[in-house]
Image: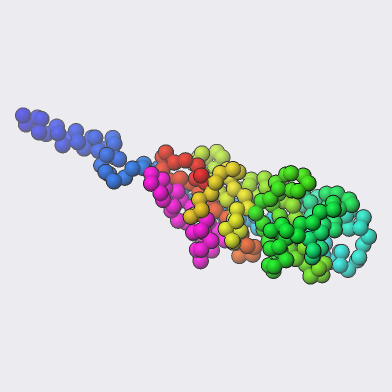
């Protein structure tokens, strides 16, 4: 009888050690190990992605300044303008073409083709944003009207040209820096959004992004940080960085639950 009484608490203790979730009656998820390491990895991924995006945006901005000076001061014939657009595009990794668009939305020059296609982009959101917003505008991913291929428009209004310059960026160029977790975990990802919350690109490419996570990011006054997003049976750590130079926000995420689904789903 005494042996039975002694073994009972021991058995209970063993049961709690083997099945810790049984001891936490209200906890319905199991946390993954080493949350501090996950936070370090996720924060580093967000910083690396921001640096990649800013590097590309800086290169495009310099190219726009150069092309504006070349076109507005040299007044070259159309074939020379096209040649310079093409040469500049070739120097920008991940950029497929550069467009010169007049204030009415008509494409005047296209680095990809000569003569320029007879297309008006005046109703495109990226053109309207560039006309109304000072500085570089990073638009949401769109589908090319003639090519049918998705691209990310990076645009700016140039008064000297009385029009807009737009770089046609391959989404894969920006998404590469978000594929940080390919060899780490299947339950992580990342995204680049503009300051309005519009999705520029994301990894996994077709994963939906939590609307409430996007709203949290846009509304946060801090320029960088981490927070935990929770819903029933699911916890996700989000590390974010807001660019001080361009209107973009980069975030990386990783689930904190052992049975978590993709972090960007």
Q: Is residue 141 left or right of residue 159?
A: left
Q: Is residue 197 left or right of residue 62?
A: left
Residue found 29% across the figure and 46% down from its top? 26
Residue 16 in the image, given as x and y percentages of width and height: 25, 38
The N terminus appears in which quarter of the rendering?
Answer: top left
Residue found 85% across the figure and 58% down from its top? 108
Residue 15 in the image, given as x and y percentages of width and height: 24, 35
Quadrant of the rendered image containing residue 24:
top left
Q: Nearer the viewer, residue 236 or 50?
A: 236
* Residue projecting furthest to the left: 1
In this rendering, the answer to whether 189 lies above or below 157 is above
Residue found 64% across the figure and 64% down from its top? 245
Q: Nearer the viewer, residue 14 or 228?
A: 228
Part of the protein shown in magenta: 214-242
Residue found 86% across the figure and 64% down from its top? 70
Q: Nearer the viewer, residue 15 or 125?
A: 125
Quadrant of the rendered image containing residue 166:
bottom right
Q: How is the image coloured?
A: rainbow
Tell me if residue 48 can be seen: no
Tell me if residue 72 can be seen: yes
Residue 71 in the image, given as x and y percentages of width and height: 87, 64
Q: Give the number of marks.
A: 0
In this rendering, the answer to whether 29 lies above or below 222 is above
In this rendering, the answer to whether 64 lies above or below 180 is below
* Residue projecting furthest to the bottom: 159
Q: Is residue 185 left or right of residue 244?
A: left
Residue 257 in the image, given as x and y percentages of width and height: 41, 43
Say whether residue 227 is magenta.
Answer: yes
Say whether residue 138 is magenta.
Answer: no
């Amino acid at each position: 009888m005494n042996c039975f009484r002694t073994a009972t608490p021991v058995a209970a203790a063993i049961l709690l050690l083997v099945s810790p979730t049984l001891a936490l009656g209200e906890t319905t998820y199991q946390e993954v190990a080493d949350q501090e390491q996950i936070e370090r990895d996720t924060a580093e991924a967000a910083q690396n992605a921001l640096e990649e995006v800013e590097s590309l945006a800086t290169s495009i901005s310099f190219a726009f300044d150069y092309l504006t000076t070349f076109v507005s001061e040299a007044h070259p014939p159309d074939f020379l303008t096209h040649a310079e657009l093409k040469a500049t595009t070739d120097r920008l990794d991940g950029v497929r073409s550069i467009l010169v668009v007049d204030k009415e939305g008509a494409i005047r020059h296209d680095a990809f083709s000569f003569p320029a296609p007879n297309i008006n982009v005046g109703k495109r959101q990226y053109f309207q944003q560039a006309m109304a917003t000072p500085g570089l505008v990073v638009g949401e991913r769109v589908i090319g009207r003639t090519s049918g291929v998705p691209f990310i428009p990076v645009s700016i209004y140039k008064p000297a040209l009385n029009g807009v310059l737009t770089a046609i960026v391959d989404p894969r160029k920006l998404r590469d820096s978000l594929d940080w977790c390919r060899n780490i975990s299947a339950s992580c990802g990342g995204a680049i959004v503009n300051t309005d919350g519009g999705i520029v690109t994301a990894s996994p490419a077709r994963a939906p992004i939590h609307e409430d996570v996007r709203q949290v990011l846009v509304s946060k006054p801090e320029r960088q940080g981490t927070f935990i997003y929770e819903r029933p049976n699911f916890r996700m750590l989000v590390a974010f960085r807001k660019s001080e130079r361009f209107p973009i926000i980069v975030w990386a995420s990783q689930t904190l639950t052992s049975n978590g689904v993709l972090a960007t789903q």
